[in-house]
Image (cartoon, rainbow, N blue to C red):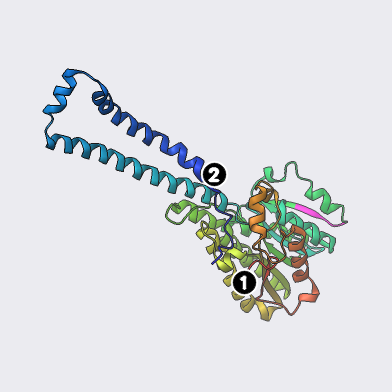
């Protein structure tokens, strides 16, 4: 069975290099432990020959056993080195398994209202697309630094709509409550919410710390609850609104090395369907998109062989583009999707086929 979200394992040469580096100390120990024996046997002198004759069979067996034990220890060490070398490369590749969105960002949008989304990658593409659709945009990120050396706000304003930035840690219940109030005060309504916040802290389950797990849950999952709760309250009073969540194929099918990330994205799927049922009678829809392998600066760092191995798992034989994600979000935010709710749209180019 193909592991669909895992980068190709390390090549034989990569693993070989890792093993070689780790086995050198073991080989040195093995060689050093046998040198005295060879020197002793190699000396052609009467004294040595007499000494050798005096060695009992029991002593010979003990010496042989000692050398054999040293040899076994070296073999065990080299085997462990091979496993560690392979695991190291596997962890390295897994952390790039596929794009998750922008760090600590969230989104909300409104036709000439607001879109609270991120300012990089998928989030930026969604914000710009919604601006072209006529929405005023409310960008949110965790710090001012995220907006430095970034022209996304200028690009949005060039579309003839308003754009405002907000600073908020979306994993904080209190901060989200205040930020939603500020967005509502600035724009008057909130017609579309795009939950795009996401981080990764990858690692195999056996090695993952509690902190790694909790941090990803706080940002990826709790943020969706925080934003949906407070923006949902605004939308209920309006008796209209659209909530669009960024899930992932990792949440649909799992991904080795990302038990925390996969769990949060699977949770978003359940939250999407629940919110759709709870708010549907108020004229509010809630849907999710689940991107697959999307072309980003992260994927650009891969080797050609690694890229090809990933593409081989995709029916369309290419990466997705951020604009293709933004296009589906645009549809879900439009009137054309007014009777679509509780759905998860996979955007993966046929990754699971």
Residue 158 in the image: state x and y as whole percent.
87, 52
- Taking the image as shown, residue 178 lies to the left or right of residue 42, namely right
Residue at 76 percent across and 56 percent down: it is 125
Pointer 2 or 1: first along the chain: 2
Residue 242, placed above or below residue 7: below
Quadrant location of residue 323?
Answer: bottom right
* Image quarter hosting the N terminus: bottom right
- Taking the image as shown, residue 234 lies to the left or right of residue 94, namely right
Disc 1, SS: helix
Please tell me how many numbered marks the rendered image carries: 2
Classify mark 1: residues with Cα within 10 Å, few (<14), some (14-19) or many (20+).
many
Identify the residue position indicated by label 2 in the image.
14
- Looking at the image, is mark 2 or mark 1 nearer the viewer? 2
Residue 326 in the image: state x and y as whole percent.
76, 62
Q: For residue 324, which numbered disc appears in the image?
A: none
Residue at 34 percent across and 45 percent down: it is 76
- Taking the image as shown, residue 85 lies to the left or right of residue 98, namely left
Q: For residue 272, which numbered disc appears in the image?
A: 1
Residue 186 in sight: no
Residue 11 in sight: yes
Residue 351, placed above or below residue 277: above
Q: Which residues are magenta?
A: 160-164
Residue 62 in the image: state x and y as whole percent.
17, 37
Q: Main secondary structure of the magenta part?
A: loop
| Residues at circles 2 and 1 in contact by the CB criterion of under 8 Å | no
Residue 142 in the image: state x and y as whole percent.
64, 49
* Image quarter hosting the C terminus: bottom right
Residue at 73 percent across and 66 percent down: it is 192
Classify mark 2: residues with Cα within 10 Å, few (<14), some (14-19) or many (20+).
some
Residue 13, placed above or below residue 39: below
Residue at 55 percent across and 62 percent down: it is 3
Is residue 219 shown in magenta? no
């Amino acid at each position: 069975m193909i592991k669909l979200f895992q980068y190709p394992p390390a090549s034989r040469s990569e693993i070989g290099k890792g093993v070689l580096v780790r086995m050198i100390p073991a080989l040195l120990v093995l060689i050093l432990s046998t040198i005295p024996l060879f020197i002793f046997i190699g000396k052609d002198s009467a004294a040595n020959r007499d000494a050798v004759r005096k060695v009992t069979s029991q002593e010979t067996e003990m010496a042989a056993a000692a050398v054999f034990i040293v040899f076994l220890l070296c073999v065990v060490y080299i085997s462990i080195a091979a496993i560690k070398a392979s695991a190291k490369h596997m962890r390295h590749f897994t952390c790039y398994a596929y794009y998750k969105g922008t760090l600590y960002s969230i989104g909300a949008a409104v036709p000439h209202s607001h879109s609270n989304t991120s300012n990089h990658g998928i989030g930026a593409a969604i914000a710009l697309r919604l601006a072209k659709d006529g929405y005023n945009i409310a960008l949110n990120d965790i710090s001012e630094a995220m907006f430095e050396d970034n022209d996304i706000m200028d690009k949005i304003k060039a579309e003839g709509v308003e754009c405002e930035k907000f600073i908020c840690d979306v994993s904080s219940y209190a901060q989200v409550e205040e930020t939603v109030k500020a967005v509502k005060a600035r724009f008057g309504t909130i017609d579309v919410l795009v939950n795009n916040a996401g981080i990764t802290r990858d690692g195999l389950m056996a090695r993952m710390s509690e902190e790694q797990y909790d941090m990803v849950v706080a940002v990826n999952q709790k943020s969706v609850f925080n934003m949906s709760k407070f923006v949902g309250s605004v939308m209920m009073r309006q008796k209209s609104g659209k909530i669009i969540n960024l899930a992932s194929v990792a949440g649909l099918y799992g991904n080795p090395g990302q038990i925390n990330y996969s769990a949060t994205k699977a949770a978003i799927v359940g939250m999407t369907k629940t919110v759709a049922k709870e708010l549907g009678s108020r004229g509010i829809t809630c849907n999710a998109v689940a991107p697959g392998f999307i072309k980003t600066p992260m994927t650009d760092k891969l080797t050609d062989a690694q890229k090809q191995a990933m593409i081989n798992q995709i029916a369309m034989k290419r990466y997705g583009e951020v604009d293709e994600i933004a296009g589906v979000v645009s549809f879900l935010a439009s009137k054309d999707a007014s009777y679509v709710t509780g759905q998860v749209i996979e955007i993966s180019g046929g990754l699971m086929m």
